[in-house]
Image (cartoon, rainbow, N blue to C red):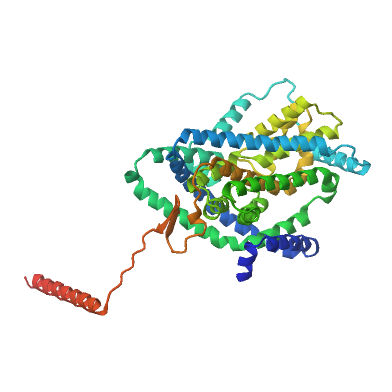
């Protein structure tokens, strides 16, 4: 248990788990499968606790941000900064694609491998239906629009919560949070205490589950080593290398911004965010790292907790910097495959289209994200179907870095919009008193009452209790005799 605790807080130890997992996936597949199953158990527990905690954290944060001076300007700063961060990631991907030129001048064997992969994907895709009338099926577009609207504004909040529909959950939470914030403190004190207890309960569940983070890292590396399409990855090695290097550089830049705003060393910021980053790398889920990010940004790094509790859940869905980088880079990669030059004006279009695709893919993860690459590819009229076949082969490798970059971009947004607000250095350490509440920089016991009695007082209390019991017995006898 002590070894797991040390490994879950050590960056070198977690890296060693990743290396050992990759070796196990290559030479000891049964051990890798067992570790993968244990990691999935951990993710199931974290996801189970993350969604209710997301709901409670969002409306707590919404209420506290609304209480800040110039709350409207603060909300505008959040939206504008988030949009700028996503656009910057898209621009970085487009520029890197043009400068590094992944996909251009591929070797003959790599080109043959990609061509065979596309043909096998198209041939294995099943029956292709073509509408000779040139129109969509009656009511198809209306059905798609209705489904999209239902995903954003669900008619049943509990169904959206049970099915994990993040957009619907956030919509219901924001509406509830606005109504909750409009009420007075006296009207919501009891409900606030209940929500505070729920919040702390799920924090405790996640804190104990964090011991399995090294097992998660080991199992993830083993799973990738066993199931990755090495030939396809080799053929698209330039794209993968460019994407991974960009994710690392942009994550480092975001961490530097956080360190500067928090006035802390960069190494300390990276150390505090490592658990959230690892869960984002391994889970393939945008909601799983939310509790870790909230704890790191507020309790460890000292940013205003209300702002953190509002921006982290919303940013996990909408601040998709990793997806914007991915879409822009993939678009340039496909253009290079087809030998299509890119002008400065088209570079701007790719940036805008990639940022738009990232926002449209809100609430999607893993393979569901690939479909939105067509939005960016359509800016240059490139074939999205062939590109989707290629992206499916490398998505298991790209999904984790994409989530991790989006998470650290969200943390950078928090750091930037918190400029001018006091840092909560008093809550850098977690409360050690059971039931302690940390919110808004105040630490205190939720209901800790200590009763200390001397021997004389204890004897007097016992005598009073005995006398009361005798009186009750005598009264009962008297009532029975009548």
Indicate left or right for 273 with 124 as reference: left
**Picture coordinates of residue 307 (x, y %)?**
50, 44
Q: Residue furthest right?
A: 108
Q: Quadrant of residue 111?
A: top right
User: Is 294 on the left or on the right of 106, as rendered?
Assistant: left
Q: Nearer the viewer, residue 240 or 308?
A: 308
| Left or right of 455 on screen, residue 281 | right
Q: Give 323 or 426, whichever is nearer the viewer.
A: 426
At x 75% / y 61%, what residue is drawn? Answer: 19
Q: Quadrant of the N terminus?
A: bottom right
What is the quadrant of the C terminus in the image?
A: bottom left
Q: How many tags in the picture? A: 0
Q: Is residue 180 above or below residue 9?
A: above
Question: x%, y% of residue 218?
Answer: 70, 61
Q: Is residue 110 above or below residue 209?
A: above
Farthest-out residue, left:
482
Vertical arrangement, residue 188 with respect to residue 446, above or below = above
| Residue 364 percent location from the top left of the image | 63, 41
> In the depicted view, which residue is nearer to us: 142 or 292?
292
- Residue 151, can we see it? no
Residue 8 percent coordinates (x, y): 63, 62
Q: Is the residue 265 above or below the residue 137 in the image?
A: below
Is residue 448 visible from the viewing direction of this image?
A: yes
Q: Residue at x 43, y 59 (%)?
A: 436
Identify the image quadrant of residue 240. Answer: top right
């Amino acid at each position: 248990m002590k070894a797991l605790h040390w490994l879950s807080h050590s960056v070198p130890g977690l890296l060693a788990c990743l290396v050992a997992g990759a070796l196990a996936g290559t030479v000891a597949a049964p051990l890798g499968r067992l570790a993968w199953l244990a990691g999935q158990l951990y993710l199931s527990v974290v996801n189970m606790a993350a969604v209710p905690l997301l709901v409670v954290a969002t409306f707590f944060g919404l209420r506290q941000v609304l209480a800040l001076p110039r709350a409207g300007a603060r909300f505008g700063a959040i939206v504008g900064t988030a949009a700028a961060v996503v656009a910057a990631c898209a621009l970085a991907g487009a520029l890197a694609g043009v400068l590094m030129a992944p996909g251009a001048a591929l070797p003959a064997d790599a080109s043959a491998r990609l061509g065979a992969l596309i043909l096998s994907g198209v041939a294995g895709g099943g029956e292709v239906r073509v509408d000779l009338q040139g129109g969509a099926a009656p009511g198809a577009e209306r059905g798609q629009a209705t489904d999209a609207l239902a995903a954003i504004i669900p008619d049943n909040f509990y169904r959206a919560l049970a099915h994990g529909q993040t957009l619907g959950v956030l919509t219901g939470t924001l509406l509830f949070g606005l109504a909750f914030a409009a009420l007075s403190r006296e009207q919501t004190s009891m409900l606030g205490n209940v929500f505070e207890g729920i919040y702390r309960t799920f924090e405790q569940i996640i804190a104990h589950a964090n011991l399995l983070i090294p097992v998660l890292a080991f199992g993830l590396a083993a799973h990738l080593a066993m199931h990755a399409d090495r030939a396809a990855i080799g053929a698209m090695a330039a794209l993968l290398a460019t994407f991974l290097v960009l994710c690392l550089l942009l994550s480092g830049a975001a961490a530097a911004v956080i360190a500067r705003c928090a006035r802390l060393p960069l190494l300390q910021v990276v150390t505090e965010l490592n658990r959230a980053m690892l869960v984002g790398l391994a889970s393939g889920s945008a909601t799983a790292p939310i509790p870790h990010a909230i704890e790191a940004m507020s309790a460890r790094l000292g940013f205003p907790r209300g702002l953190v509790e509002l921006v982290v859940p919303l940013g996990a869905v909408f601040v998709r910097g990793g997806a914007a980088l991915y879409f822009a880079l993939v678009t340039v990669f496909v253009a290079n495959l087809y030998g299509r030059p890119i002008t400065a004006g088209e570079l701007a279009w790719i940036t805008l289209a990639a940022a738009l695709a990232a926002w449209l893919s809100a609430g999607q993860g893993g393979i569901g994200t690939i479909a939105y690459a067509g939005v960016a590819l359509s800016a240059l009229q490139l074939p999205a179907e062939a590109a989707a076949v290629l992206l499916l082969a490398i998505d298991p490798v790209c999904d984790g870095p994409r989530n991790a970059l989006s998470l650290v971009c969200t943390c950078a947004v928090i750091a930037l919009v918190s400029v001018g607000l006091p840092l909560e250095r008093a809550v850098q350490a977690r409360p050690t008193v059971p039931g302690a509440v940390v919110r808004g920089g105040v630490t205190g016991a939720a209901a800790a009452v200590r009763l200390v009695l001397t021997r004389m007082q204890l004897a007097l209390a016992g005598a009073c209790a005995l006398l009361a019991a005798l009186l009750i017995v005598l009264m009962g006898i008297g009532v029975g005799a009548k």
